[in-house]
Amino acid sequence: MTAQTDTTQGSVTTVYKVSGMSCGHCEGAVSGEISGIAGVASVQAVAATGEVTVVSETPLDDAAMRAAVDEAGFELVGRV
């Protein structure tokens, strides 16, 4: 099972599971850190589901994602 989808515009959409988000502030913190990763075009974090959808130019390095989520104070569980 993979959550990566190549789109027709040359971008990749990946959905991640992040534990610990409970509010809009949490969503903003996670989105802000992930947005700092080179190649990220957009980020949508949803605290209610714990899912973070990332659109990027190329597939993202899992270590970079984990570091960004850790920096925001949360835990990257993995890809959905």
Image (cartoon, helix red, strand yellow):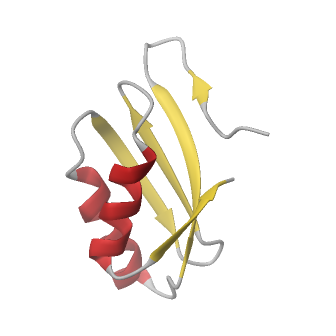
Residue at 51% in and 88% down: 22
Residue at 45% in and 30% down: 59
Residue at 53% in and 11% down: 8
What percent of the width, then of the height, locates residue 5? 62, 28
50 shown above or below 26: above
Along the horizontal axis of the image, is 51 left or right of 26?
A: right
What percent of the width, then of the height, locates residue 50? 60, 72
Total marks shown come to 0
Towards the viewer: 50 or 62: 62
Along the horizontal axis of the image, is 15 left or right of 58?
A: right
Towards the viewer: 43 or 64: 64
57 shown above or below 3: above
Quarter holding the N terminus is top right
Residue positioned most to the front = 63
Residue at 58% in and 49% down: 15
What percent of the width, then of the height, locates residue 24? 41, 81
17 shown above or below 36: below
Give the image quarter of residue 10: top left
What percent of the width, then of the height, locates residue 67? 32, 63
Towards the viewer: 19 or 23: 19
